[in-house]
Amino acid sequence: MNKQLLFVKRPEGEADASTWSLETHPIPEIKEGEVLIQQHYVSLDPAMRGWMNEGKSYIAPMEIGSVMRAGSVGQVIEAKNHPEFKVGDFVAGYAGVQQYIATDGKGYYQVDPKLAPLPMYIGTLGMPGMTAYFGITEVGKVKESDVVLVSGAAGAVGSIVGQVAKIKGCQVVGIAGGPEKCKYVVEELGFDACIDYKNEDVKERLKQECPKGLDIYFDNVGGEILDIALGRLRMHARIVICGAISQYNNKKAMRGPSNYLSLLVNRASMTGMVVFDYADRYKEGAQILGGWMAAGKLKSREDVYEGIENFPETYNRLFSGDKMGKLVLKVIED
């Protein structure tokens, strides 16, 4: 049987258990030219909250009754004359939160568990890694000696952004929640400093760590911290808008930046980043990130939980901060 998590209710504010329904259906039968994939892991990302909203966005909103959208990685266990995939292949794509899927293979690509653990293909070598790499290099236009600030620094995207900036020869300061995360960001990931937004005055610490201001701010959180960063820009600074997790569960209007005239004064830019714009370059990004990992220059961390029935509880870790690195759910049953 195939356990599927269906999206049944658009949340107002935070999503809770009533947002989804766990149902069991027969494993789908495949047609000519299709494959059957047994899912091993699914990705949990802050972007999921936006996908649940009705209205225009960079991707179509999820429909009520559909399988919860998610990046995934699994193995082909049946194939009927598929032109690209065969039984035994491991593939990554967007199969959603379910244990099996029948598909024509469009949008999927082969991965090798001998080169990297499967969860890494929906983490550093998947969408979060591509977001980080292309966000800081293409949108942020990072260059040697830049002063870079990264919010959500212990998360799936922010942790890679900061490490890439260090590889490029930058001074890198992170922002994270709690002393344990800040210690991880500095001691394990190699950031120059990390500001604990839960226990420190972010504005004052930022003045201390970056007295001459910022060349790049990579924003994963929005809200008050975005305003603080705007107040510390150097001439021709770049802000990369990747996410705004502090605002996703708001029941009221999203808080916009009040300090935006700093962009004018400093001839700076603030640009939105959507990873799907770089889909034709994912292979390039994965090769570069994989090479850095092989050389010991880049670290990857996946926080893996088990059980498709535990999706709601695991999803909430995205917003409570009770996780480190990339959040992944194992859905295959041993």
Image (cartoon, rainbow, N blue to C red):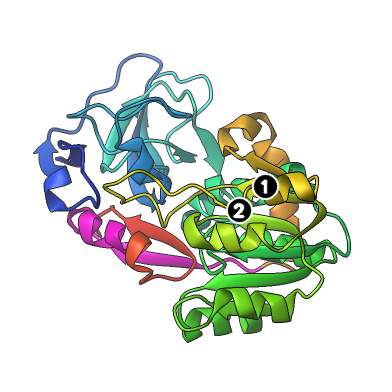
Viewer can see residue 65: yes
> x, y (%) of residue 18?
11, 47
Dot 1 and dot 2 residues touching (CB under 8 Å): yes
Q: Residue 149 falls in which quadrant of the image?
A: bottom right
Q: Which residue is mark 1?
A: 261
Whether residue 307 is in magenta: the answer is yes
**The N terminus sits in image quarter:** top left
Q: Position of residue 311 (x, y in %)?
A: 24, 55
Which numbered dot is residue 186?
Answer: none
The residue furthest right is 144
Pointer 2 local density, CA inside 10 Å: few below 14, some 14–19, many at least 20: some
Kind of residue sitting beneath label 1: Leu
Task: Write down the residue under mark 2.
Answer: 259
Q: Which part of the image, by quadrant, shows the C terminus?
A: bottom left
Marks 1/2: CA–CA distance: 6 Å
Callout 1 secondary element: helix
Is residue 293 shown above or below 236?
below
Range shown magenta: 299-317
The foreground one among 286 and 18 is 18
